Image: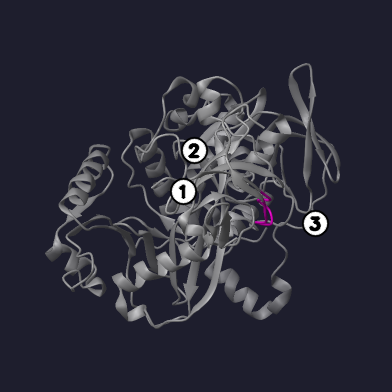
Amino acid sequence: MSRLICPFCGPRELREFEFHKTLPNAGDTPFERVYLRVDSLTHSVEHWQHIQGCRAWLHVERNPSTGAVLVMRLATAPGVA
Amino acid sequence: MPRYSALALLRARFQGARYWKPLWTGRTLKAAYDVVVVGAGGHGLATAFHLARDHGLKVAVLERRLVGYGNVGRNTTILRSNYLLPENHYFYEDSLRRWETLSRDLNYNVMYSPRGVVDLCLSDGDMITASRRGNAMRLAGIDSELMELDALERFAPELAPRRSRRFPIVGALVQRRGGTARHDAVAWGYARGATALGVDIIEDCEVQGLCTEAGVATGVETSKGLVRANRVVFATAGHTGMVGAMLGVPLPIETHLLQAMVTEPIKPLINSVLIYVHPGHGETYVLQSDRGGVVMGGYLDGFPSYTREGQWHRLEEVVQGAADLLPEIGGLRILRQWAGTNDMTMDGSPIMDRVKYDNVFLNAGWCYGGFKTIPASGAACATLVATGLAPDIARGFRLSRFATGHLLDERGGGPFPVRL
């Protein structure tokens, strides 16, 4: 995954993007949201930002064992599907 | 277990290959133990060794693959205790002291080489930060020297600190007792030492679940059957997230990749471990292995991954930093490049505590400092497991600190394991 496909900018180098956090949150309290992580070997849902490009927040789904990017789209507000 | 010595080596010379016996294979899994340690890496083996030696317990180490197959064989072998926070530097210093005598304690040459760790400063601001850290260390009785260019030129002439660079060097924080050791030898030495004390090391034995009864762990389910245990220790750095998933407990850990690489061997050039954090670029550390290869590493890849494949942009950054620091190595070819999975905690400091059950322990979250802490971690974790109380030097590493706000945030970076 040395390239990611931004829904706005197309294929761009990985270094333009910044990983933010895995989802879903481990719970609803601030402590759980900030500090705890639910880990998976095969399917990771994450927020990224195209920090050196269009700066859009992105919803990314990846397989962390193979590096395959399964979904990459614009992130939506919490509670919106 | 034959004791290694010059005489034994001479005997081996005459007996030939018959002298060398397997050091830890061939043990069979028994039905019950005092303690089951999950993971035969550096920390798991060291914990088992100290549980057997210091506390006389019956211990098994269960390993999914092979002894020393994970991060203990994948790191850049740097040993140092130059940390700012007291909870960290007392612990890492305890470890460094143990490294100094480890070869004797294990009767196995771990090739500890106190060649000095040089943290380079590129600005007055760097010097101020370094002197603060150095002073904190000196107050704790840990050796640390702030060097300006003259002293640095004498200590590390290969660096030619006055040479014109894109980011000129202005000084360094040097820990002379820091250095390197032979990574595989540490795993092998502890495995041999533990086996000699009656520890069963079972390879190819995957732990699939924890057995519990009335809120107490009673053993583990493995690919080789059920094993009963009074206490269970998870020392599975790099896969601690999976332990959390198995126990149903979200942990303050993300798993990130850290890559390293080594060039073709050359004659001795680099005398110490050079750490170079260059503005706007990232980080490069450079050392020369005993075989002559220039070992280089840098910062984390930047996102959770279990692939063990480093990303190109980080490799490029590490190599650029190394070539900027020592232009003469710029033409060398890289022989190998690899990555290890790192337990990154939300404050960058480790976790040594009970988890979920009163008799289940976690030895995890070593971030990128796991190798250097193996001896201290083994001793401290064994004390915690055997007596129920962590020794003073490891009290800060409790799991509850994230909830109570007693973070050990060495970097002062907030609850992100990756941001620079």
Residue A70, horizontal then vertical, whole percent = 69, 51
Q: Nearer the viewer, residue B231 or B257?
A: B257
Q: Amino acid at mark 1?
A: Gly
- On the image, numbered disc 1 is attached to which residue? B369
* Residue, far top: B214
Chain of residue at mark 1: B
Magenta run includes residue B15: no
Is the image coloured rainbow, by chain, by secondary structure, or in one colour?
one colour
Q: Which mark is residue B350?
A: 2
Q: Chain of mark 3?
A: B
The label number, if any, that marks residue B26 in the structure image:
3
Identify the mark nearer the N-term, 2 or 3. 3
Question: What residue lies at 51% left-to-right and 58% top-to-bottom?
Answer: A14
Amino acid at pointer 3: Gly
Distance of label 2 from label 1 (alpha carbons): 9 Å
Going by the image, does A31 lie left or right of B118? Answer: right
Viewer-nearest residue: B273 or B345:
B345
Labels 2 & 1 near each other (Cβ < 8 A): yes
Same chain for marks 2 and 1? yes
Using the image, determine if residue B267 lies above or below residue A21: below
Q: Are marks 1 and 3 in contact (CB under 8 Å)?
A: no
> Where is residue B42 drawn, in percent x and y?
58, 50
Q: CA distance from mark 2 to mark 3?
A: 33 Å
Which span is picked out in magenta? A62-70
- Residue at image position (64%, 74%) is B12
The kind of secondary structure element at disc 2 is: loop
Amino acid on which the number 2 mark rests in the picture? Pro
Q: Is residue B237 visible?
A: no
Q: Quadrant of residue B246?
A: top right
Q: In the rendered view of the protein, which quadrant contains the N terminus of chain B?
A: bottom right
Residue B267, image x and y in percent?
38, 82
